[in-house]
Amino acid sequence: MSSQLIDLFIDAFIETLIMVGVSGLIGVVFGLPMGVLLHLTDRKGVMPILSLNRTIALVVNSVRSTPFIILLVAIIPFTRLVVGTSIGTPAAIVPLSIAAIPFMARLVETSLREVDRGLIEAAQSMGATNWQVISKVLVPEALPGIIAGLTILLISLVGYSAMAGAVGGGGLGDLGIRYGYQRFLPEVMLVVVLILIVFVQLLQTLGDTLVRRLNHK
């Protein structure tokens, strides 16, 4: 393999890291509170507000039910408005982030549902405020599940970022399509797949390790 191709692989991997890292961070920053809000405002939540819960759930379900490749194309005007272009790594981060937020929200909501309700009731009986219930009981108890959910999110974003390469999003997916498919270099496609497999394995191993450590506490 030529040094030029090696440089391309390095640049493409860095672009993939940026896309997954930035969109994953945005997904956590906005998805975590959204997931907490979904749980709190549920019928059996600490602050049941069904109208708000149904509104948020509608938005979350609408985005999650849209295939990523369709979402990628559908929001091109919005992407151009935000970053000034519809191609390249910055442009790919926009749809990746939009897909990540509701994904993370549902994963957080599911983790919070698994918290023993007796712990919540015990905290409330001792006079804990809603914020104290959230910060001292709900989130700490659900943290292993939230970390596991974050791992799933990041792995999904790796796949989405590769898909973004189909429309010039940059990263390993773009490299695989431009060189492996369009230039008939199957060895390039093979290396791209191997890199993605190793990357996903590393993310899963790291996530599993964190979850085990948190569960021991």
Image (cartoon, grey):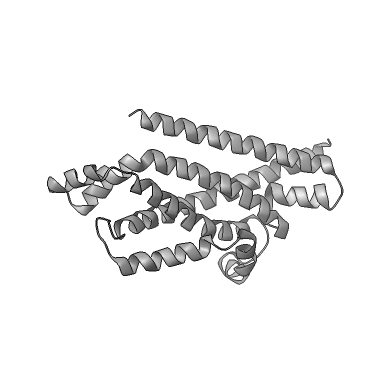
Residue 1: percent from left, percent from top: 83, 35
| Image position of 18 with respect to 206: above or below | below
Q: Nearer the viewer, residue 158 or 123?
A: 123
Measuring from the top left, give residue 194's x and y in whole percent: 71, 37
Which quadrant holds the C terminus? Answer: top left
Q: Is residue 205 left or right of residue 45?
A: right
Residue sitting at 47 percent across and 30 percent down?
Answer: 209
Determine the image quadrant of residue 67: bottom right
* Figure label count: 0
| Residue 202, placed above or below residue 186 | above
Q: Position of residue 147 (x, y in %)?
A: 43, 41
From the viewer's perspective, is 190 left or right of 131? right
In this orientation, which residue lies closer to the viewer: 36 or 161? 36
Q: Residue furthest left?
A: 126
Is 114 placed left or right of 12 in the picture? left
- Identified at 82% across, 50% down, the residue is 181
Q: Residue at x 64, y 48 (%)?
A: 15
Q: Position of residue 44 (x, y in %)?
A: 27, 56
- Residue 197 vs 63, above or below: the answer is above
Picture quadrant where residue 65 is located = bottom right
Q: Nearer the viewer, residue 14 or 103?
A: 103
Of 16 and 121, the residue lying toward us: 121
Residue sitting at x 47%, y 44%: 150
